[in-house]
Amino acid sequence: MTMEEILHVNSIPALESELKNIHENQFKTVEDDELITLFLREMLVRVRIKQIEHILHS
């Protein structure tokens, strides 16, 4: 993975897009295991967004 790809994947718009995909999948999912996985992914994405915001404001 190049530095450009890493920066893109960790950009706030890309992460917000990932959150949108997670939320859409939550409505399609009926199994508990899948819901737990989606909630964990959402939490990780939100943490990454906060980390990036913290770095930008430092």
Image (cartoon, rainbow, N blue to C red):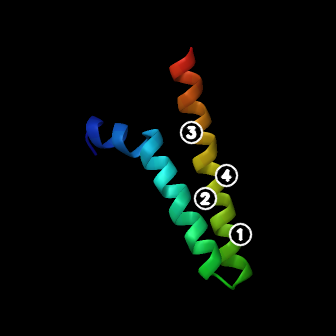
Q: In this view, does 20 lie above or below 54?
A: below
**Mark 2 highlights which residue?**
41
**Mark 3 highlights which residue?**
49
Q: Which is closer to the viewer, label 1 or label 3?
A: 3
Q: Residue furthest bottom?
A: 30
Quarter of the rendering containing residue 46: top right
Q: What residue type is labelled 2?
A: Arg
Residue sitting at 53 percent across and 31 percent down? 52
**Mark 1 highlights which residue?**
36
Q: In which quarter of the image is the C terminus?
A: top right
Residue sitting at 62 percent across and 49 percent down? 44
Residue sitting at 56 percent across and 39 percent down? 49
Dots 2, 1 in contact, CB < 8 A: no
Q: Is mark 4 on a helix, strand or loop?
A: helix
Q: Is residue 20 above or below residue 11?
A: below
Q: Residue 12 carries which label?
A: none
Dots 4, 2 in contact, CB < 8 A: yes
Q: What is the C-alpha distance between the residues marked 1 and 4? A: 11 Å
Q: Which amino acid does label 1 sit on?
A: Ile
Q: Where is residue 9 in the image (x, y as percent from the top left)?
A: 39, 46
Q: Which amino acid does label 4 sit on?
A: Met
